[in-house]
Image (tube, grey):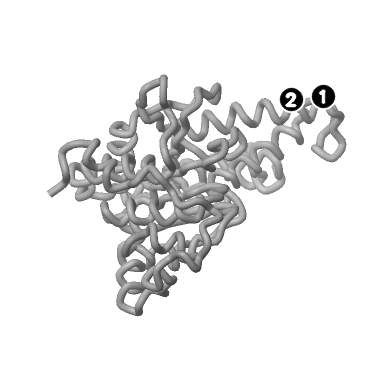
Amino acid sequence: MLMPTLPLLLLLCEARAFSPGTPEASLPKSARPLAPTKAEAVRLARLRPLHPAVLLVRTFDAPNVGAAARAMLNFGLCDLRLAAPECDWTCEAAVLRASGAAPLLHAARRFDGVAEATRDAGLVLATTARPRDLRLPVLSPRAAAARAAEAAARGERVCFMFGSEKNGLSNEELRVAHALVAIPTDPNFSSLNLAQAVLLTAYEWALARPEAIDAPVEPEAKLAVGSQLQSLLGVTEAALWRTGFFGGGRRVEEADAAAAARARAAMDKLRCVLMRSQPSESEVGLLQGALRSLLHPKNAVAAEPRGP
């Protein structure tokens, strides 16, 4: 049974982290990294598609990754992803903080950036403590969890994204997000430990999951994933350059600085529109096909009506 109060939950996730400089010799031998057993690896592989992924971006304190893994496993989340990590997340200090969730650390997948890490995600929810002017919806953890449960019930991959302990997520990294998540902390002391943020998000997911996870999947409603959206944006930008929409040339390579700036601003707005609307795979396919026919009109000649 889930615990009813958040203060009790936060006790599970100690606020004090080991210093990155903690000497490994001072750690007990029991904290040494252990690779997952075959049975554990099979279990993690089986559960991964059923629950949201947790993506940690540019994390620099290894014990924080360990504590986040523990928080994930408390609520059944087992797909840990790391984008451009700045630490060894399988070191002894991290394993000690994981407190039994070490297999999750060793099963974690590393990516060079957030675009690569979210290629398979139909819904990316990014946590942020700072107000952003990105024209994206800002959700509470509970509302975000409800939206995640609905997406998961349709068979979509959901990804919760958390930024670096130093400065959170950059606006560039937030370009892959469909919505932002703001945890309502006291404005006089709003800073949360990374693992605490993961724990609160995972807790809300656990509450929301039973309400929608068994809903029937509608094949036509399957959301487009990150790689498909990026492909559509690429085709859209190419079509807009070809038609001279941005001015200053018909190709980005020929554009002056002003045209390139207009293109970036316009594509950022189009990206936000696309992320907010969350089109289905079939809708993205239709849009791509239409744009490609405009880019290559010779392919559409056969479809033109003929005279008598």
Q: Nearer the viewer, residue 253 or 101?
A: 101
Q: Tell me the residue at 53%/49% (across/down).
A: 59
Q: Tell me the residue at 34%/62% (across/down).
A: 101
Cα–Cα gap, marks 1 and 2 = 6 Å
Please name the amino acid that badge 2 sits on: Arg
Q: Tell me the residue at 24%/46% (across/down).
A: 206
User: How far across and down, in percent of the image, does residue 38 sit?
Assistant: 35, 79
The disc at residue 297 is none
Residue 63, above or below 9: below
User: How far across and down, in percent of the image, does residue 73 sit?
Assistant: 30, 57
The disc at residue 262 is 2
Q: Residues within 10 Å of mark 2 (few under 14, many from 20)?
A: some
Residue 70 visible to the viewer: yes
In this rendering, position of residue 244 left or right of residue 222: right
Please name the amino acid that badge 1 sits on: Ala
Q: In what element is the residue under mark 2?
A: helix
User: How far across and down, in percent of the image, does residue 126 sit?
Assistant: 46, 38
Residue matched to label 1: 258
Q: Nearer the viewer, residue 151 or 124?
A: 124
Q: Nearer the viewer, residue 210 or 195?
A: 195
